[in-house]
Image (tube, helix red, strand yellow):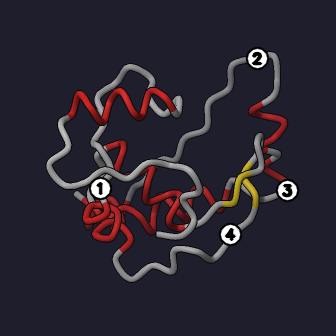
Amino acid sequence: MDGLGELPLFPEGTSWEAAWGRLEEFALNDGLPMVPPTGNLLEEMLGSASGSRSHGQLPPLFGELTATAVAYQCVLAGCEPGVLPLVLAAATACLEAKFNLLGLLTTTGTPAVMAIVHGGCAEQLG
């Protein structure tokens, strides 16, 4: 899978405990339960999305925002595959200069960014 850099993928059947420890090494957990990302889960999440195309650089560390990177995080969070286009669109929208994501994420306050989904899209996703 391209676009993952050093992020770990796990063989099918990897124990949750083993995956947890490895994810901890990459500082990818916050104490909440996670789904160990496997190649199959990542491919299922990506579906027909173009994984390596960059949508831009995401502040504050300016990593490349790709469908593969977002799909990896969606798998970790336990999302259903159908939500990837929505999550990717929300992440891409945060790149708008007017939104000033860098300013939000590096302020001394405690802002949080969220997306509220309603209407037909929410009904379709359940």
User: Disc 1 on helix, strand or loop?
Assistant: loop
Amino acid on which the number 4 mark rests in the picture = His
Q: Position of residue 61 (x, y in %)?
A: 76, 42
Q: Residues within 10 Å of mark 4 (few under 14, many from 20)?
A: some
Where is 70 relative to 111, above or below?
Answer: below
Amino acid on which the number 3 mark rests in the picture = Ala
Q: Residues within 10 Å of mark 3 (few under 14, many from 20)?
A: few
Residue 55 shows which numbered tag?
A: 4
Residue ID at (30%, 36%): 19
Q: CA distance from mark 1 to mark 2?
A: 36 Å
Where is 7 relative to 65, above or below?
Answer: above
- Tell us which disc is closer to us: 3 or 4: 4
Res. 3 image quadrant: bottom right
- Tell us which disc is closer to us: 3 or 1: 1
Q: Position of residue 111 (x, y in %)?
A: 68, 26
Q: Report the side of 100 relative to 77 (left or right).
A: right
Which residue is the site of mark 1? 38
Q: CA distance from mark 3 to mark 2?
A: 20 Å
Compare marks 1 and 2 and give the one earlier in the sequence.
Answer: 1
Q: Report the side of 47 relative to 55 (left or right).
A: left
- Tell us which disc is closer to us: 2 or 4: 4
Compare marks 3 and 1 and give the one earlier in the sequence.
Answer: 1
Q: Position of residue 51 (x, y in %)?
A: 51, 74
Q: CA distance from mark 4 to mark 1?
A: 24 Å
Amino acid on which the number 2 mark rests in the picture = Gly
Residue 97 shows which numbered tag?
A: 3
Residue ID at (76%, 58%): 57
User: Disc 4 on helix, strand or loop?
Assistant: loop
Compare marks 4 and 1 and give the one earlier in the sequence.
Answer: 1
User: Disc 3 on helix, strand or loop?
Assistant: helix
Amino acid on which the number 1 mark rests in the picture = Thr
